[in-house]
Image (cartoon, rainbow, N blue to C red):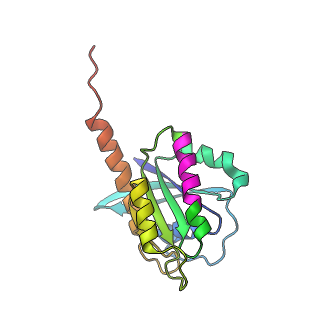
Amino acid sequence: MVYKLVVLGSSGTGKTALIKRLLQNRFVEQCEPTVNHLYEGQLVVDGEPCELAINDTSGRELFRDLREDCIRWGQGFLFVYTVDSIMTFVDMTLFRDQLKRVKGTSRVPMVLVANKVDEAHWMVNSDMGQDAAKIFRVPYVETSAKTGQDVEQAFQELVREILRSQDKGRRFTPCRIL
């Protein structure tokens, strides 16, 4: 099975850098603005190798329709903001609203990621991120694409969220009477 992951967030949050850190174990200082790019790779989650297809989306409003196509395609969503920008944090609500509208439900596998935790000046502290994750009812992970801190953990947690949602679907699927 291939897990279809979508990375969402405002421009400049390090979405591409997180993906490249995960798949290539390297940090890319400067990335060209992404329109849409699909990466493929593997990740071990709880001892099991998992195939990943990761859609790196644009955070720019200009590409809203393309982002909606990615949302339709995806199974799980990494919502990325940066600790040094309050606006990227506020934008999480807009991305979540778009996700709920496109998917038609709020029960979608998702992980909230605070990136750039290696930065000295935080405008969004850990408590704010944890509170938002509680409101969204999703896991919260603090990462640094630069140092590699907890990047793998963020993607592992997203795969776990997808697996949990599939288990719930199977558990509550009513039997069909023929």
Where 170 falls versus 155 (above or below)?
above
Q: Nearer the viewer, residue 43 or 5?
A: 5
Residue at the spot 59% in from the left edge and 65% down from the top edge: 88
Q: Quadrant of residue 10?
A: bottom right
Q: Position of residue 86 (x, y in %)?
A: 58, 70
Query: Residue shown at 46%/68% (left/top)?
Result: 128
| Quarter of the rendering containing residue 28 | bottom right
Whether residue 86 is in magenta: the answer is no
Tell me: residue 141, above or below residue 138. Answer: below
| Residue lying furthest right | 62
Q: Quadrant of the C terminus?
A: top left
In the image, which residues are magenta?
91-102
Residue 22 appears in the picture as rendered: yes
Residue 151 in sight = no
Q: Position of residue 115 (x, y in %)?
A: 51, 72
Indicate yes or no whether the magenta region holds residue 92. yes
Compared to residue 18, the image places residue 50 above or below, namely above
* Residue 172: image location, x then y, percent: 28, 34
Pick whichever, 45 or 74, lies toward us. 74
Q: Main secondary structure of the magenta part?
A: helix
For residue 118, side relative to residue 30 (left or right): left
Residue 64, position in %: x, y? 67, 49
